[in-house]
Amino acid sequence: MNTAKPGMSPLTEPGAAKIRLLDLSPEEIGAFLSDWGERPYRAEQLTGWIFRKAAASWGEMTDIAAKTRARLARTYDIAPVLTPLLLTESQDQTKKIVWQLSDGTKTESVLIPERDHVTLCLSSQVGCGLGCRFCRTGDMGFKRNLTQGEILGQVFGAKKFLSPDQNLTNLVFMGMGEPLLNPESTVKSLAVLTSPKFLAFSGRHISLSTAGVVPEIYRMGALGLDFGLTVSLGAPTDELRDGLMPINRRYPLKELKRALKAYPLKKGRRITIAYVLLKDVNDGPHEALELSRFLTGLKTKINLIPFNPWSGAPYDRPKEETILKFQKILRDKYHTVIIRRSKGRDIAGACGQLAGQA
Ligand code: SF4
């Protein structure tokens, strides 16, 4: 990955790969422009072109002197960082986009239309190394982290697939990968996504999903960034979770609960608990009561996600009556519980189905 340290002017050898501006933070861009002797407004102009207008050519930047643009072009690259390889549209209008990255690997995003807005499900990695047994991405293994530019590029690229009456307002980091194992790019991209100067997404409308990387939950909490936290739980006991989500052997439920308890929630917010329901594995009354017990003392709401099958998956989707019974047990214990009917199941674009393929 090409990056520049703040305050340093990156040098490129003749023939060396150029540095992608979308991979730098606004501060890093400001720092090298300052080293060049440019006035502060130049950084405002350039970062606006990169992070707000997603400029794809130097020619567009008409308010920047041609001489400066030529100098920028010698070292820096603004070509799109990912190319849409395949677009599949579901019967429910969900769109799955497979992106080709510059090193030949692939990642995916999913545009999910809701009643009055659109949600984009973003990836943070190519593949995932955590190997949750119910997840197709986990089945493909870890290839690499995405850069800041590749995360932001999904937002810019996906916007092109919206129809004129659609409004992209919500982002969920629930595509491929574990965002808290790619914290640098995730945090840097969040800063751009929520900045009023750039993409101005509301933190209320951004959710980051983790399988429970405990040290990073503490670290994210300490950073005080504005986003919603979702925890993929999968099972309410260590015995069951160890088998479904190998990360639990590293960070067992007791440690996870301690981290969630310490997580500084903004006023009126709750942690979302995503619980994938697997037939005859974790969908019984006993597990519902154990789940309630685990959540006691935490400010949470529960999303039940009936398993979305994929080819070769070792699990099935529970029957509707089982799902409703599970929900009722939790509601009777005064939990807020929503059954998430994942969209895009027919195009392998639903929760847990992404694998960089059609
Ligand atoms: S559920 Fe999330 S963390 Fe688990 S394997 Fe899938 S992508 Fe990785």
Image: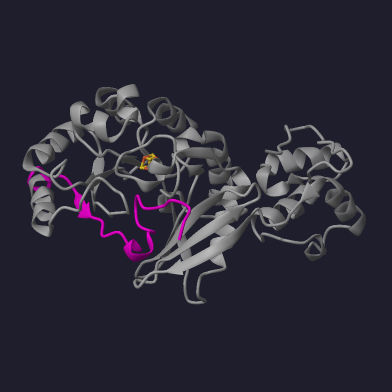
Residue 229 visible in image: no
What segment is highlighted magenta in the picture?
Answer: 330-358
154 horizontally vs 221: left or right? right
9 horizontally vs 300: left or right? right
Report the residue that reaches farthest toward the right: 67
Q: Residue at x 75, y 42 (%)?
A: 30
Q: Residue at x 16, y 41 (%)?
A: 281
| Residue 99 image position (x, y, % from top left) | 56, 56
Residue 29 visible in image: yes
| Residue 220 image position (x, y, % from top left) | 45, 32
Looking at the image, in which quadrant does ligand 1 appear? top left
| Viewer-nearest residue: 19 or 33 | 19
| Residue 164 image position (x, y, % from top left) | 52, 76
Q: Residue at x 87, y 48 (%)?
A: 74
Task: State which quarter of the image contains the N terminus.
Answer: top right
| Residue 325 image position (x, y, % from top left) | 8, 51
What is the chief secondary structure element of the magenta stretch? Answer: loop
Q: Residue 342 lies in magenta, yes or no?
A: yes
Q: Residue 35 lies in magenta, yes or no?
A: no
